[in-house]
Image (spheres, rainbow, N blue to C red):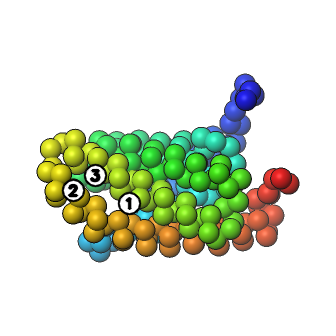
Amino acid sequence: MLFKRDYFTLNEIALMSLLGGLVFVMLMALRMPLHIPGHTGIFMVIPVIIGVAIIQKPGSGTYIGLVAGVLLSFFGVSALHVFDVFQYTALGMVTDIIGYSFRYRMDLTPVSVLAGIAGNLAKMLVNFAVNLAIGIPLVVVIIEAGISSVSHTIFGALGGLISAYLIARLIRTGVITRNAD
């Protein structure tokens, strides 16, 4: 498959950068001490899913996740802040794969919910891989993964549900146009 020389236009790069920054701002502004693993997934996956739905090109979610991860790594929000770039890039890559697989029909509720769940779980898996790499015992990581995978799934699904609603509204108002496939 041949790509044009300018794969992303300047407007698309600006939009993806703004959405990556929005992930960062939402995580900073909406800090809630709920102590439930994955609770940030309810609002963290929304800009990534919306960005993939608007741009409709492979790599858009990865770019959004990379921008968010670089910002979060630079400002050190979480305990493993240096590795945030890997977590959010994984979230974007999985969202890209889901979007490409379903022809970027993120306005459909099952597709957005699946993208939210898969993105939030990918972020969780990278987090646990980092925990293993820094020397946390395997038994502890497996128990944590089993427990927190349920909450990551629930919060990712809720974020995907909100995304589907927002994308459908943007399509109805004419802000987003769908490809005539």
The quadrant in which residue 27 appears is bottom left
Looking at the image, is mark 3 or mark 1 earlier in the sequence?
A: 1
Q: Which mark lies nearer to you, 3 or 1?
A: 3
Q: Residues within 10 Å of mark 2 (few under 14, many from 20)?
A: some
Counting from the top left corner in percent of width and height, residue 77 is at 30, 53
For label 1, the residue is 28
Q: Which kind of residue does numbered mark 3 sit on?
A: Phe
Left or right? Give the position of 148 relative to 158: left
For label 2, the residue is 141
Q: Give above or below for 179 relative to 159.
A: above
User: How far separated are the C-alphas under marks 3 and 1?
Assistant: 22 Å
For label 3, the residue is 128
Does the residue at mark 2 contact the one at mark 3 (Cβ under 8 Å)?
A: yes
Looking at the image, is mark 2 or mark 3 earlier in the sequence?
A: 3
Q: Residues within 10 Å of mark 1 (few under 14, many from 20)?
A: few
Q: Give above or below for 94 relative to 167.
A: above
